[in-house]
Image: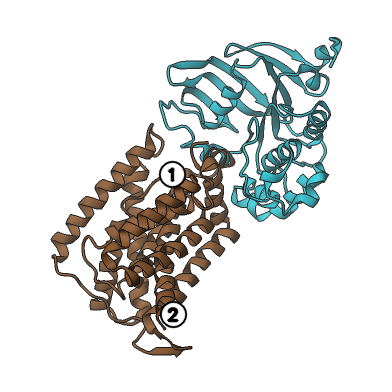
Amino acid sequence: MDAAAIAAPGGAPAKHEILNVKGLSAGYGPMRVIHALDFIVYSGERVGLVGLNGHGKSTLFYAIAGLTGWQRGSIRLNGVEVGRTRSQGPGRFTHLVVRQGLALIPQGDEIFHGLTVGEHLDSGAFTPRAWRERKQRKERVLAIFPPLVKLMDTPVGRLSGGERRMVSIGRGLMAEASLFLVDEPSLGLAPKAGKSVMAALMSVELGSSAMVIAEQNVALLEGKVDRIIGMHVGKLKGEASAALAFQTRREL
Amino acid sequence: MDLGFIITNAVVLACIYGTLAIGLSITWSSVGLINLAYGFIFALSGYGAWLGAQHISTNGVVVVACGVLTGALGGLLVCALAFIPIHDKPNFTVRGLIATLAISLIGGQALLAIFGPRAKNLPEIFGSWKISLAGVVLTADKVGNVVVSIAVVTAVLMWMRSSRRGLEIRAMMMNPHAAAIVGIGVRRTGFYVMAITGGLAGLAAVLLSQTYYISPFGGLAPMIKGVSIALCGGLGSVRGAVIAAVLLGLNEALTARLMGGQYVLITQFLLIILILLMRPRGIAGILDRAREA
């Protein structure tokens, strides 16, 4: 079966830990953003991570990818230790973490403005297997984001904000990953565009992989994810299953 | 007749300096290093080609290959010494500048110690024929220089357009941070980039040695010209570098003909200052998104 990472055949595979973070602290220079945080994500799970600006959602994602200024603590991805104590060198080991099965879809538009949409999607298929299968993978991404089909040869620098976000997310989905970290997919988009991006994320078949979505707008997540976790000043606070989240009522 | 001579000279110089400038430009925008050791790589590969001509064969292909390979090795050396240890430390741009300058100085002295101060010359790799085209005499080295440099630079650019490694390098040129997120190993890509740009320097060294001699510090002037062309074209822009190379090559040939060779650097830098005054980011600069963004 090709592309088992995203589209696994039906039936519930045994649940196992995809990500296990223990005692993670991270920050930039003298600033400590994340304080001794523990976090477990299971396979097949869609987790919402909510919290205000500046409370460490993005830093948590960056720390998992090894992109913070410094960090310490254990991060196990698919049972392999990828966290390390680091005092400098953000990004030095990120490609090794990515090879272990991480797809980080960063906040805002971390795009390559001169590459076309097609090249962008290629650049997301980094592991050798994903690179060989990039045609099928591209088709699958295009099925999720149909507007990209006619933009394949357009430089990304010319696209609108919503289209860029689609490219950015599509690039993440190209990877042969078992953990998708999606950082504020609706940020800076018109409510309608934000909703459709979110709907596309929900339509991704996870199979045995997992997805964590950081979001400030809880209403966009409610009822659609398996768990919602709150984040407050660098620590995880409170957890609600989707069933509980259903009972609260909010206006958009 | 005279005009033809000026134009052919301009084109030859533009090709050689353009090769250097494109190498410097790619280095800057993908790994963020202003490679001041480029002159050293240039001289080193000149000596590599000379050794190849002395010991292996004076066949043109062998000499060029020796030069390019030595240049690539020199690039790897510079990468291992000046990029890998400091690329993720603070102030990398300035530190890298100083580190490559140090390599350039130490390397130049080492070449002087090993090969002695006497300049070497390479065999005529393109033969010694000449053709006359519409009253303009084209010598073998001129034709060869233009054809080889354009072919190699085009091949490199095509490779960067179409291959996966090229995609990695271009991605890193545009957004190093996002490149890391996608899974591109900064250090490995650094080695590719430095090997390729070193190879380009080696090529330029062999081609220029058809006109000038090889000497331990012979790389300095070409490097200064390469850097100024790359600056003029907008660091990081290949198209800009090509246009700037043509402009400055034309200027150099015109100045040498009309005013004399000693004025070349003066008019060169006047022209560069003029261009940068009018277009601060160079001819086709993408500096805004290249590194600091």
Tell whether A190 sits left or right of B249. right
Residue B41: tell me if it is visible.
no
Residue sitting at 80 percent across and 42 percent down?
Answer: A145
- Of residue B262 and residue B207, the one placed in the foreground of this image is B262
Q: Amino acid at mark 1?
A: Gly
Which chain did the renderer colour brown? B
Q: Secondary structure at mark 1?
A: loop
The image shows residue B51 at horizontal and vertical percentages of 24, 72
Q: In terms of image quadrants, where is residue B123? A: bottom left
The N terminus of chain B lies in quadrant:
bottom left
Residue sitting at 83 percent across and 20 percent down?
Answer: A223
Pointer 2 or 1: first along the chain? 2
- Of residue B158 and residue A179, the one placed in the foreground of this image is B158
Q: Label 2 crowding class (10 Å Cα cut-off): few <14, some 14-19, many 20+? A: some
- Of residue B289 and residue A201, the one placed in the foreground of this image is B289
The image shows residue A91 at horizontal and vertical percentages of 49, 35
The image shows residue A105 at horizontal and vertical percentages of 65, 34
Tell whether A205 sits left or right of B93. right
Q: In terms of image quadrants, where is residue B76? A: bottom left
Which chain did the renderer colour cyan? A
Q: Please give the residue where the numbered disc 2 appears in the rendered image.
A: B4
- Of residue B4 and residue B117, the one placed in the foreground of this image is B4
The disc label shown at residue A203, or none: none
Residue A191: tell me if it is visible.
yes
Residues at marks 2 and 1 touching, judged by CB atoms closer than 8 Å = no
Q: CA distance from mark 2 to mark 1?
A: 40 Å
Q: Please give the residue where the numbered disc 1 appears in the rendered image.
A: B32
Chain for disc number 1: B
The image shows residue A103 at horizontal and vertical percentages of 63, 37
Tell whether B113 sits left or right of A198. left
Q: In the rendered view, tell whether residue A55 sits above or below residue B176.
A: above
